[in-house]
Amino acid sequence: QVQLQESGPGLVKPSETLSLTCIVSPYSVSSGFYWGWIRQPPEKGLEWIGSIHHGGNIYYNPALKTRVTMSVDTSKNQISLKLTSVTAADTAVYYCAGRTVTKNWFDPWGRGTLVTVSS
Amino acid sequence: QSALTQPASVSGSPGQSITISCTGTSSDIGGYNFVSWYQQHPGKAPKLLIYDVSKGPSGVSNHFSGSKSGNTASLTISGLQSEDEADYYCCSYAGSNHWVFGGGTKLTVL
C-alpha cells in the first residue's frame, strides 16, 4: 500500500517561496501514478493545486499556475512543490495525494502538513 | 474553474438517511462520470468514499452511495451512525487533466 509523507517548513514569510516535499513509500515514484498536491485553508474546503507524472506530464490549477512548480526526484523517491510570492491566503494544510494513471480519484493521501504564512 | 457548490451543513438523527448535493457545470460534473466523494474527520486526511459517481472502494461501508443527474452529484448516507459525523467533499474531473473540489459539507449527527 502506497504511503505518502509530506514535510517542509511550517512557517513562511510573505512574498517568499513555500517549498514542500512528499516522500513516496514503499512503491517507486515512477510507478503508475500521478502525484498531486491539494491544499486546505483553515476551516475551508479542498483546492487542487496540480498533478505530476514522472514521465513529464504536469498540470496546474489555472488560478495558481503562475506561482507553482512541481517536480519529481526519482533518486529520492519524492515529489516537490514550490509556491512563490506567498501571502496569508496561502496558509493551509498541504496534502500530497496519488491518483492511479487510469483512475479518476485521489487515493492515497498523506497526512498533510500545515504551512502558515506570516511575518 | 470554480469550486463545486455544496451545502455548508446538513444534519440527521441516527438511523436516518441524508443526502449531500454537489453542483457543478457541464464542464465538470455534467461532462464526465468522474465524481468522487471524500470523508474527512477533524485533523485527519480525506478518505475516499465513492469514485466514478457511484462505486464504492473495498473496505468502505455500503451505507454510502452516490449518484448524478445532470450537473449535480449526490452522496447519500443511509442509516446514519455517530461516526459518520464529519466533513464531506465532492470532487470532479474538469477536463484537460484538471480537477475541482467542492467547498465541503459538515454533517452533524443529532
Image: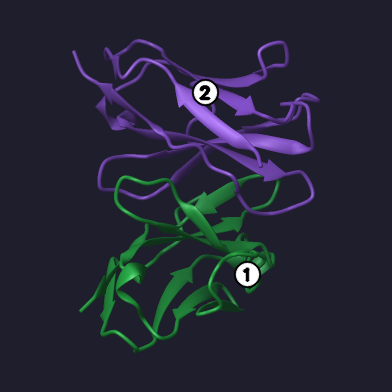
Mark 1 = which residue? B56
Circle 1/circle 2 CB separation < 8 Å: no
In the image shown, does A7 or A115 lie closer to the viewer? Answer: A7
- Report the side of B68 relative to B18 (left or right): right
**Identity of the amino acid at label 1?**
Gly
- Report the side of A92 relative to A8 (left or right): left
The image position of residue B9, as x and y in percent, is 27, 69
Mark 2 = which residue? A66
Secondary element under disc 1, as helix, strand or loop, is: loop
In the image shown, does B35 or A60 lie closer to the viewer? Answer: B35
> In the figure, residue B39 lies in which quadrant?
bottom left
Chain letter for mark 1 = B
Query: Residue at point 76% right, 25% down?
Result: A54
Q: Which chain did the image draw in purple?
A: A
> In the figure, residue B86 lies in which quadrant?
bottom left
Whether discs 1 and 2 lie on one chain: the answer is no
The image position of residue B46, as x and y in percent, is 45, 51
The image position of residue A38, as x and y in percent, is 49, 39
In the image shown, does B92 or B13 lie closer to the viewer? Answer: B13
Q: Residues within 10 Å of mark 1 (few under 14, many from 20)?
A: many
Query: Residue at point 36% right, 70% down?
Result: B84
Would you say residue A60 is visible in this rendering? no
Q: Is residue B106 above or below residue A70?
A: below
